[in-house]
Amino acid sequence: MPVDYQQIHHKIKEIGAGARQRRQTLDGRRKKARELLNQYAADLDSLRLKVDAAKLADPNLRCALPVNEPLDSHHPAPESVAEATLIAADGSQVNPDRHAAVLYSLINIGAIVWRTGLGSSPQVFTYVDLAYGDELYTDTGMISEDLVALGRDLSERKKILELALRYPEPVITLTDGPIELWGAEGSSQEAYRRNREIHLSILSQLQSRNVTVAGYVDKPAADLVVRLLEISRIPDNEMKDVRRTHGLRNVTDRWLFGEEGNPLLQKGERSAIFVIQSSSRNHYEGDREIRFFYLNVGNNKHPWIARVEIPAWVAENRLYVNTLHSSLLQQCAILELKPYPYVLARAHEIAVVKFDDKKQVELLLQLELGNNGEEIGVASPKQTIKGLQGRTRM
Amino acid sequence: MTQIEIGRLLRAGTTGFIAGCRVDQLEAPAFGALVRAPLSESYQVYGLIHDIHIDDDGLVRQLVTADNVAEEVMKDNRERRIVPVELSVLVVGYEQDGKIHHQLPPRPPLSLDVIYLCDAAQLVRFTSAGRFGYFRHILQNQDIPAGELLAAHIQQAAAAHGAQGLKWTEAAAAELITLMRDDYPKLMSVLSALGDLSPE
C-alpha cells in the first residue's frame, strides 16, 4: 500500500501554515548568532572558560573550541600547489543479512593517488575483505553492522597509511567524513577501543612521515561554532542545564560562514582553525587532537561550506594547512557545479558495492559452497517477498 | 600472427553481439572493421562493427560543464574509470573446422569471450570465400546504416586485397547491384556511399 496521502494532507497543511512563524524565529536567532560571533570574535579566553565550565556539566559536550585566531577570521586561498600527492580512500560494506541465503560480510576499499603537477593518470587501488563462518562472530555473538562499519573505517585508514609511505613529500591524505573513528555501542566497545588504538598508531606513523591528514565533511550537520555561541550566552549559574539549552536551534554553521549572497567566507576562503571539543579528546590528544576549519568551496553568490578536519600536527604547520587548503580548492574546482573533491568522488566510485555486486558475490559463494558439499541456506520468505518487483504502472 | 584484442563480449544473439572495450583499446576498432570471436580452436564467429557507442555517466556529465578539464582528469577518465565503450557488431558469418560460411552461426559467442580485430590476411580470406553471401545480412538489417557500413567495409577490404583490390571492389559492386536490383532507392544510397570513397 502506498502512503495514505489524505491522512497526511492535514499535517502537511499545518506545517505549511507555520512557515512564516518559523522563518521569523529563525531570522531572530540568526541575527543573535551573528551578534554573538562579532561580540566574541576576539574574546577567545572567555569562550574557553565558558567551554571549560560547560564540560564540567556535560562531559559529552560537543562544540568548537577556539585556538588562537578570531572567530570571524577568513583566510584567502593560498597559491596553487605546484606538486603534491593526494591520496583519498573510501569504503563500503555488505552487512551480514540473516534473511539472505548465505551469511557473509564484505568490506570494499577504494583508493586513488593523484600526483599534482605531473599530468599523469591517477592510480587506483582496491582492497576487499570477505568474512564468512566463524569470522562473523565475536565473543558475544554475531558481528554487528556497527562493527562492520568500524572495520571498514579502519581498513580505509590502513590503506591510506600503506599508500602514503610509498610517495615523496608533500603527501595529503583525504577521507570522507570525520577523522576520528566512530564508536559502537554496547558489546562493541572493546572492539572500538582496540581499533581506536590502531587508528592512533596509524596517525602517529603518518605524522612521523610528515603526511597532511584530513577528513572532508561535506554539508556538515554538526553546528560546532553555533554551539559555542550558545554556550557563550549561558550564565555560569545555569551551566548545569547546558545539555538542554539550545537558544540558537536551527541556526547552522553553514549559514554562519556561508550565508547566501553575503558569506563570511568568500569564495575559496577558510575560517579560523578550531579544536573539536568532544569526549574523544580524551583519546585523540596532543599532536593527534582533532581540529577543523570551514572552507567555502562554492562562490560568493552560492557559497558551499565544507568542514575540514585535521590533526593538531597539521593545524600547527602553516605550510601544511596552506597546501591542504589550496589542494582542496583545486580538487573541488574540477566538479565546480557540485563542488566536492574529485579524488574523494573517485574513491567512492571505486569502493561502492552495488546491489548487483552483492548479488554476484552471494551467487559465487553459493556455487562454491554447493560444489564443495556444504549446506546452503535459502533466502527467508520475508526477503523473497520484499524482493518481488512491484507494479510500475497502475 | 599478431592478434589485436579489442574487447570482450557483453551480450550476444545469433544476428549480432555487443562487445565492451576499454578506452585505451579504442584506437584499434573502426566502423566497418571485420572482427572475430573465437569460441574454440575450430569455431569462430565473424562480424562487422556497425556502431561504436560511448555512454555518459553522472561524473562525466558533471565534468563536461567545467571550464577546463585537467589533464589528470582526462587520463583518469580514459585510462582508469570504467568508461562504457560498446562496439555493436553485425554477425556476417562463421568459421568451422577451417571452412568459412557466410550464413548465420549455429550459436553465438558467450559472455566475456575475447573479440579480435581481423588482420588483412583474415579479411581477405573471409571476403574471398564464396560470392559475397554475407552482404545479405547487411542489406536485410533495417537498423543499421547499410550504405555507410558497406562503403567502410569495402574500402577496408579493398585495401587488404592490395593489387587485387580494384578487381574485388568491382565484383562486390556488381553483386550489390544484383542484390538490390528491386530496391532502387537503397541501391542508389549504397552506390552513393561507395562513390564517396576516396581512391587509395
Image (cartoon, coloured by chain):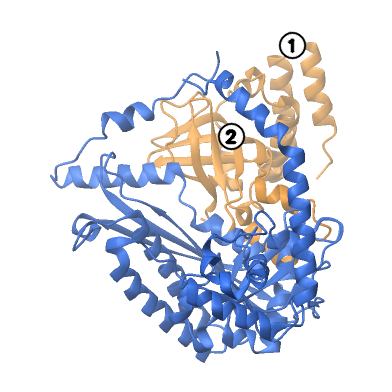
Chain colours: A blue, B orange
Report the residue marked by disc 1: B181
Kindly state the secondary structure of the residue where label 1 is placed.
Answer: loop
Tell which of A66 and B160 is nearer to you: A66
Report the residue marked by disc 2: B89
Q: CA distance from mark 1 to mark 2?
A: 26 Å
From where the camera sits, is residue A347 visible? Answer: yes
Q: Is residue B152 above or below residue A70?
A: above
**Number of marks:** 2
From where the camera sits, is residue B132 visible? Answer: no
Residues behind callouts 1 and 2 on a single chain: yes
Indicate the chain on which mark 1 is placed.
Answer: B
Q: Is residue A158 above or below residue B105?
A: below
Tell which of A174 and B39 is nearer to you: A174
Left or right relative to A187: residue B195: right
Indicate the chain on which mark 2 is placed.
Answer: B
Comparing labels 1 and 2, the label whose residue is closer to the camera: 2
Tell which of A241 and B180 is nearer to you: A241
Tell which of A342 and A326 is nearer to you: A326
| Residue A126 placement (x, y as % from top left) | 46, 64
Kindly state the secondary structure of the residue where label 2 is placed.
Answer: strand
Q: Which quadrant would residue B56 be assigned to in this image?
A: top right
